[in-house]
Image (cartoon, rainbow, N blue to C red):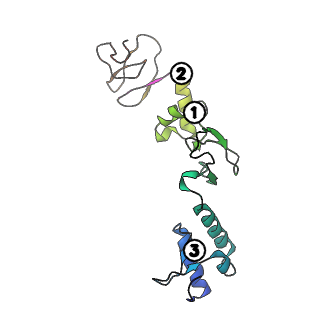
Amino acid sequence: MGCNHSYCKNCIVKYISSKLQENISRISCPVTGCNGELEPQNCGSILPNDVFVRWGDALCESMILVSERFYCPFKDCSALLIDECAGENKVIDQSECPECRRLFCAKCKVPWHSGFVCEEFDKFNNDEREVEGLQLMQLVKNQEWQRCPSCRMYVGRSEGCAQMKCRCGCDFCYKCGAHSSDHYCSNCGT
């Protein structure tokens, strides 16, 4: 569209494929300085079906505002999803991917973090956000373990006062998790 340049079928297919791999959906004529554009409907007869479909999907995706689109958080799915509540005051937490049918947190854009509110989940380290990490975090929550503020290891208390000494040497309050010294926590007063 907009120019008279011509190329062989194989070259234009490779050109379009390379642009799509670069996440470019609006593809211009390969001639430098030319304002002509290639369009899927004009190239459909020479393109392999998978390239044609990928180009159509890329064009559709480019029409959705960045703030409204995200992808299924499951790596084996990654379906394009649209946040229809973006910009509104609606808060939707739990949602189901229409493609893979698995639950995810629409607020955090991660697999569903059962048993944890989003604010708790936000505090987790990256390695604690996967399935195994969430299972560990559920155990931590159930056992009421506290994390050492220095080395970040989990510590369990069986009895005694709230003042703890971690194996790294750090003294901390088991109730609030803050650094403490001399058997007194200035943070929570215990």
* Numbered disc in front, either 3 or 1: 3
41 shown above or below 156:
below
Residue range (magenta): 143-149
Other-residue count near label 1 (Cα within 10 Å), few / some / many at <14 / 14–19 / ≥20: some
- Residue at (67% x, 47% y) in the render: 97
Marker disc for residue 143: 2
Is 28 or 186 nearer to us in this picture? 28
Residue 153 placement: quadrant? top left
Q: Is residue 39 left or right of residue 163?
A: right
Upstream in sequence: badge 3 or badge 1: 3
Q: Position of residue 100 (x, y in %)?
A: 69, 49
Upstream in sequence: badge 2 or badge 1: 1
Q: Position of residue 16 (x, y in %)?
A: 57, 76
Q: Amino acid at mark 2?
A: Gln
Query: What residue sits right under mark 1 in the picture?
Result: 135
Upstream in sequence: badge 2 or badge 3: 3
Query: What residue sits right under mark 3 in the picture?
Result: 17
